[in-house]
Amino acid sequence: MKRHIICIGNRFVPKDAAGTAVFDRLQEMHPLPAGIEIIDGGMAGLNLLPLLEQGGRVVFVDAVNGFSGPGEIVLLDHQEIVGSLGDSHFDHSAGLAYVLKVLPQVYDGDLPEEIILVGLEGACTPQMIERAAALSITIAEHGLKDLR
Amino acid sequence: MVKTSKGMNIPLNRAEGDLEIRVEIEDGIITEAWSSGTMFRGFEEMMRGRGALDGLVVTPRVCGICSITHLTAAVEALDAIAGITPPDNARRLRNLALMVETIQSDVRQAILMFMVDFANREAYQDHPLGEEAQYRYSPLEGRAAIEVIRESKLLLQIVAIIGGQWPHTSFMVPGGVTSIPEISKILQCRIILERFCSWYERSILGCSRERWQEIRSRNDLTAWLDENPAHRESEVGFFLRFSRLAGLHSLGIGPNRFLSYGNFPLPLETAIKSRGERLLNAGFAVGTEVSSFEERKITEDISHSWFQQGTKPLHPFSGITKPYASGQSSQLYSWIKAPRYGGEVVETGPLAEMVVAGNPLFQDIIAKDGPSVFARELARLTRPAHLLGPMAIWINELLDRREDGFYRTVKSIPDGEGAGLIQAARGALGHWVKVQDGKISHYQIITPTSWNGSPRDEQGIRGAWEEALIGTPIKDIKNPVEAGHVVRSFDPCLVCAVHCLQKAKKKGSLLLGFNR
């Protein structure tokens, strides 16, 4: 089964850099368990769609806001991510929720069997980045079950 | 009695990044406008002291939408410094990738960001086509909205093939590109392009690209619309019908000055003919009067921007980016500088490209009606009709000449200066780079939105969309869809900012009000 860890965010905007910081950490953690591919998703928005039609399991890592207290890591499943979509308009900052909401209507190929978000709240300490990196690997390997 | 509204915040139905627009409204008409970029970008400062090649990796991350575009400008600046002309196949591959990014941006912007406002229920409930607009453009479910996401996604595979990596490819390097796809992959590009062309002709144009290019005047356009149902039912046809009834022809005039850097350098040997060295010529136009482009005429004025004051407008090779946000708060109001061409305010984007390139239809529209929201958006929606043909030619030339070179060795970047001037989807984009002792000593970027969304200059002349907003009627101050049409016809993009997932995300609001 394909397993992708897609880290998203803007590495030049501190409030949005959590995902890319985790990406950098994951790159250092060689070797990763077999079959896991890590991707610097940046701010690609809708252009992430091609990564979501290869089946398997997809773990997103991104900064989040308002799900729990600062310094915490939240795990969201597919439905919870889509449920966070407030404004349904597309704009230049169209986020993950928008992408997942349109996915079933636009995909070619195979939908992922499982989509999970590892969300980092607030300013990130190195410990948080470390935890999120480890967590994203565990989830990529085993899914969300038993983790919450 | 004249009713003046000052200090009012008018909610708009969604935000465009870090942009605030304040207006004064008298008797339901916008009489003053200030456009304010509210985030300091600072890429210029970040680049100084880095390795000469770092622009290739850093600047594509300036924007999540236009990463290939920034890569192209960055590499062309380095080509210029190195004094090298990339081989023909490198030209073809670079052009193809940039064209894909442009086309996908055009169709997405038109349908998902501009025409989605036609589905604004409150504003257009009495519009005879309002209900159909809902069916076509409603977010997340409109037929056209879904189609455009799917088709633009498929087109993007061409960039994945050419770039060898998705996302964040860095396949362009000084001297050319890093690799050339195998024949089977180039054939795949051709199939992807053919599929996209047939969708674009069927759904967007409603006719062949050749038929579209026969339209040479406003009258031809009217005749085309009435010619058959496929024309009327296409997205362009619907746009024409909806716009006419919504009065978009008289909305958002702007400065009537146009700037295009030109785009897509031609391979030395190619079947494509052009008057210049590029597929699209560079130029400056006052109305339809086109003159040649002179790079040295570009300056940046900071008299109304939050930068350290005291310098005259400077050419980007000498430009200084020192943020300074205190004092003179009444005069300074934006983090965007005010680029000017020969001291004049200009607009840039697809319409400017069409006018400068001498496209007969758009020259006729500008000559008779002047610029407008209608002209600007029509130019964007139909620009792909002019790019898809050359793309097919270059893909075929790649198949024929697969074994030709794609890279000329550039061992290191010498000290010197160079500029990469191209057309991004939103208009003129320039990277001005100086290299000293192998390191970047100076990097200035002027984005299209700096041109279009600039603040006033030292003469007090408004920026392009500030000017375009003047005279805009606002029927409902709580739902100022007309102001949205004007600003969005320029496709504002203020450098992607924070966009993390937010719980119970509040409705985006673009402030249209006097108080910041």
Image (cartoon, grey):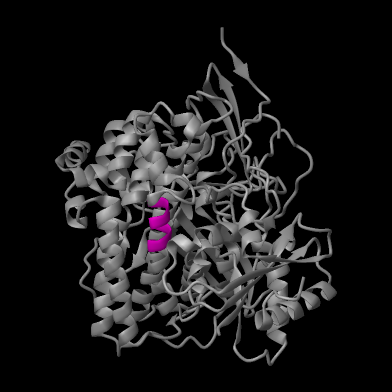
Residue B336 image position (x, y, % from top left): 62, 48
Q: Which of the pair B184/B456 is nearer the observer?
A: B184
- Horizontally, residue A89 falls left or right of residue B203, namely right
Q: Is residue B148 magenta?
A: yes
Q: Is residue B70 visible?
A: no
Q: Residue furthest front?
A: A146
- Horizontally, residue B129 falls left or right of residue B494, namely left
Please identify the dominant SS of the magenta region. Answer: helix
Residue at 54% in and 81% down: B413
Residue at 74% in and 36% down: B329
B72 to B458, vertically: above or below:
below
Residue B437: name its quadrant: bottom right
Residue B243: name its quadrant: top left
Residue at 42% in and 48% down: B142
The magenta region covers: B144-151
B312 to B396, vertically: above or below:
above
- Quadrant containing the C terminus of chain B is top right
Residue at 78% in and 39% down: B327
